Amino acid sequence: MPSQSLGEFQSLLGSVDQLIAIHGALQHGRGCRHEQDAIHRAGVVMTVAAWQAYIEKILAEALEAIGDDIRNPAGGVPAPNWAKHTYKMRCAALQSEIKKGADPDNSILGLSWDLCARADLATTNKIA
């Protein structure tokens, strides 16, 4: 089953593409970039928001696919009780984290915000 999350993510990135187009239209010659920081930041914020929405949706899709397989296993062999119980526990914990909408301690994604900030600066410097 193909993921619908990827299509939605790509659609959200369309707004970032619009910002890039606006950024290009604002550039007139060398050294005229001193008032474009807001566009750079908006692009980063919109990209991160789209990524967060994608991660939340893809996790929900994955949990649903796993649940479907446990409830209706391929080949007709029922899942063992320990697998059903583990799925219910893990599913509840992940859904709780997804509903929070934010991951300040990076427990789901395992990302370092310091690393993201450095990547953001490198990207901003390439754009500017």
Image (cartoon, rainbow, N blue to C red):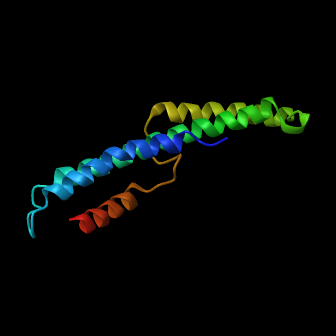
| Residue 52 falls left or right of residue 42 | right
Q: Position of residue 72 (x, y in %)?
A: 81, 30
Could you tell me how many numbered marks the image carries?
0
Q: Quadrant of residue 52?
A: top left
Q: Quadrant of residue 118?
A: bottom left
**Residue ID at (53%, 37%):** 57
Q: Position of residue 60 (x, y in %)?
A: 58, 35
Q: Is residue 120 above or below residue 59?
A: below
Q: Quadrant of residue 49?
A: top left
Question: Between 69 and 81, which is closer to the camera in this rendering?
Answer: 69
Any part of residue 103 in sight: no
Q: Position of residue 21 (x, y in %)?
A: 24, 53
Q: Is residue 101 above or below residue 13?
A: above
Q: Quarter holding the C terminus?
A: bottom left
Question: Between 90 and 31, which is closer to the camera in this rendering?
Answer: 31
Q: Is residue 110 above or below residue 12?
A: below
Q: Position of residue 34 (x, y in %)?
A: 9, 60
**Residue ID at (36%, 46%):** 14
Q: Quarter holding the N terminus?
A: top right
| Residue 80 falls left or right of residue 2 | right
Question: Between 75 and 27, which is closer to the camera in this rendering?
Answer: 27
**Residue ID at (8%, 63%):** 32
Any part of residue 101 in sight: yes
